[in-house]
Image: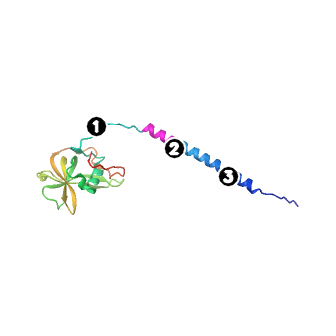
Amino acid sequence: MFICNFKINKKKITKIFILFAGIIALILLAISTTKIFEEIKNASNTETTTISDTIPSPDIAVLTEENYTDILKEVHDDLNTYLGQKISFTGYVYRVNDLKENEFILARDMIINNKNQTVVVGFLSTCKDANQYENNSWVTVTGTIQKGYYYGDIPILQITEIKTCEPPQNPFVNPPSDSYVPTSIIY
């Protein structure tokens, strides 16, 4: 028969455990710090920042395919801030049955999923010659944002200039971006 007595020194085992835990913590800290500095280095190498000494003119804001839905959403959400703002944009004439003779929606098709399903979005627009423009005809307009009523207060674009044009290469717009930062003037 073989008998073995072990005497466990709890203080030594605790010290060894703390030592190993400290070494592991230091290794993890070193790895994390290295990865953070690599990310910062990669980000600074790939991003270029252009500084412009000019501020866009707030006289007439030109909406693009990239910012159209962001601005449309912001103007609907905070109409009073944008009253009187002049904008210019290209869209197509879209009418629904209950619009007045001098009204149409300056519309674009917003992609709502990756299966090319779209929904019509746009500014309700008014102009004296609105009935001269057929549904689905493309126009470029310049106008002023006014407050109107269509099942509630909404922005209405009072058109001051309108001309027919060819459809853009990309007739679609994307949904509003979560990264859009609104300002009191549309740029």
Q: Is residue 137 visible?
A: no
Question: Which amino acid type is shown beneath numbered disc 1?
Answer: Thr
Mark 2, residues whose alpha carbon is within 10 Å: few (<14), some, or many (≥20)? Answer: few
Q: Which of pointers 3 and 1 lies earlier in the amino acid sequence?
A: 3
- How far apart are the alpha carbons under marks 1 and 2? 35 Å
Residue reaching furthest to the front: 11
Q: Are marks 2 and 3 in contact (CB under 8 Å)?
A: no
Q: Residues within 10 Å of mark 3 (few under 14, many from 20)?
A: few
Question: How far apart are labels 3 and 1 at the CA level?
Answer: 60 Å
At 21% from the left and 60% from the top, the residue drawn is: 153
Q: Are marks 3 and 1 in contact (CB under 8 Å)?
A: no
Instruction: State the separation of the CA atoms marked 2 and 3.
Output: 27 Å
Whether residue 24 is visible, yes or no, is: yes
The answer to whether mark 1 and mark 2 are in CB contact below 8 A is no
Task: Count residues near mark 1 (Cα–Cα under 10 Å), then give few for <14, some for 14-19, many for 20+.
Answer: few
Residue at image point 23% right, 55% down: 80
Camera-side residue of 169 and 35: 35
Residue holding disc 1: 54
SS for callout 2: helix
Badge 1 element: loop
Which amino acid type corresponds to the residue marked 2 in the rendered image? Ile
Which numbered dot is residue 36? Answer: 2
Which residue: 17% across, 55% down? 104
Along the line of sight, the residue nearer the viewer: 3 or 30 = 30
**Magenta stretch bounds:** 36-46
Which residue has dot 3 on it?
18
Percent of width and height locating residue 169: 27, 43
Residue 122, magenta (yes or no): no
Q: Which of label 1 and label 2 is nearer to you? A: 1
